[in-house]
Image (cartoon, rainbow, N blue to C red):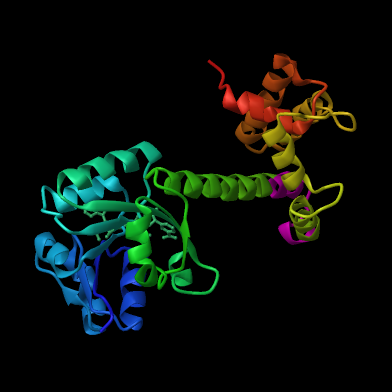
């Protein structure tokens, strides 16, 4: 028989995880603050634990998927975690995750943290992966069952790392797509549709990740790690002036200017700190030294 697993939290993500474990042929125990949400899973073969203590007792491995870490404290209270591995896949700040590790050991358990890199329909599907951090031996022991949800991407013992990677990815995702929406809104003020712009946006985003003159992702990684920012062909001052023009264009178009202004301010802070003749990657200096 495959090893059992308990799932705490039955929002869209936790419910999908519980169903994925069931489809893998595992005994699954579930617990949720709102017990009614367990009904479809119980119909599919899950056991609804009457209390959080019963849910914890049912399996060595307890997967948690809730809105935040406070929800775990609210749900678990002072429960005995002796011999239990709590794998919390909820969102939180890295320091919160580190504190949760202390909380788990105080109650006799071990904490593994994770950041889920897939929406619920992607769970258990090819391409899904989850960032994990925490005790490596514990993760290795449960690698097979965790692998049912998606590829196990282990980052290190620091419990905060999984969320740092998760948030780095989310920030990249949200800010890139928000910049795309700003671009669409800007063009929309002149009657250009999102679909007319699509081929141009797609080319830019694709080329950023490839080798070639627009392959800035790889180029910037090398420059940042070497702390060298050549600006011979397109220096930052020139680009900061260009960023001013984007703010002007947004104003003229009557669209939101907060994003373009933040970008412009960052560029000029780096220029004012002496990086005007350097390349774009020198903006990392302004990001690392926030304005007072
Ligand atoms: N959905 C996604 O695309 C996605 C992708 C990656 C990561 N995540 C992460 O996965 C986690 C779960 O997301 P979700 O989409 O399932 O929806 P969610 O709304 O973030 O989580 C809902 C779950 O949290 C529980 N909950 C919230 N506050 C609680 C509290 N104080 N005490 C007890 N339980 C509490 C809810 O219980 P009730 O049912 O009783 O309200 C429900 O089980 C989040 O941290 C999210 O950031 C989600």
Q: Which residues are magenta?
A: 183-196
Q: Quadrant of ligand 1?
A: bottom left
Q: How many marks?
A: 0
Q: Residue 236: percent from the left, percent from the top?
A: 79, 27
Q: Is residue 261 visible?
A: no
Q: Residue 149: percent from the left, percent from the top?
A: 41, 70
Q: Residue at x 23, y 83 (%)?
A: 45
Q: Residue at x 25, y 58 (%)?
A: 85
Name the image quarter holding residue 261. Answer: top right
- Horizontally, is 225 left or right of 22 in the view? right
Residue with the most extreme front position: 137
Q: Residue 79: percent from the left, percent from the top?
A: 11, 52
Residue nearest the observer in this picture, 188 or 216? 216
- Dominant secondary-structure state across the stretch colored magenta: helix
Residue nearest the observer in this picture, 179 or 118? 118
Q: Residue 125: percent from the left, percent from the top?
A: 49, 74
Residue nearest the observer in this picture, 183 or 60? 60
Q: Residue at x 40, y 43 (%)?
A: 158
Quick check: is 193 in the magenta stretch?
Answer: yes
Is 267 situated above or below 42? above
Location of the N terminus (image quadrant): bottom left
């Amino acid at each position: 028989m495959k090893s059992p697993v308990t799932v705490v939290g039955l929002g869209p993500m936790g419910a999908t995880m519980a169903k994925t474990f069931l489809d893998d042929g595992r005994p699954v125990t579930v617990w949720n603050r709102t017990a009614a949400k367990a009904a479809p899973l119980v119909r599919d073969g899950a056991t609804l634990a009457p209390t959080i203590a019963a849910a914890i007792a049912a399996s060595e491995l307890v997967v948690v998927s809730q809105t935040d870490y406070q929800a775990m404290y609210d749900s678990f209270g002072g429960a005995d975690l002796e011999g239990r591995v709590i794998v919390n896949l909820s969102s939180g700040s890295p320091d919160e995750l580190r504190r949760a590790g202390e909380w788990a050991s105080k109650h006799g358990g071990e904490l593994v943290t994770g950041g889920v890199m897939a929406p619920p329909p992607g769970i258990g599907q090819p391409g899904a992966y989850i960032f994990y951090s925490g005790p490596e031996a514990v993760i290795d022991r449960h690698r097979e069952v965790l692998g049912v949800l998606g590829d196990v991407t282990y980052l290190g013992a620091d419990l905060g790392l999984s969320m740092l990677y998760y948030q780095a990815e989310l920030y990249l995702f949200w800010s890139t797509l928000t910049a795309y929406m700003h671009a669409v809104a800007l063009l929309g003020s002149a009657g250009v549709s999102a679909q007319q712009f699509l081929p141009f946006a797609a080319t830019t985003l694709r080329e950023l990740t490839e080798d070639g003159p627009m392959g800035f992702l790889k180029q910037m990684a090398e420059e940042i790690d070497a702390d060298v920012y050549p600006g011979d062909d397109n220096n930052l001052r020139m680009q900061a002036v260009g960023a001013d023009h984007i703010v002007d264009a947004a104003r003229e178009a009557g669209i939101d200017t907060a994003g373009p202004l933040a970008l412009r301010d960052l560029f000029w802070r780096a220029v004012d700190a002496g990086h005007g003749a350097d390349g774009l990657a020198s903006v990392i200096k302004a990001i690392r030294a926030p304005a007072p």
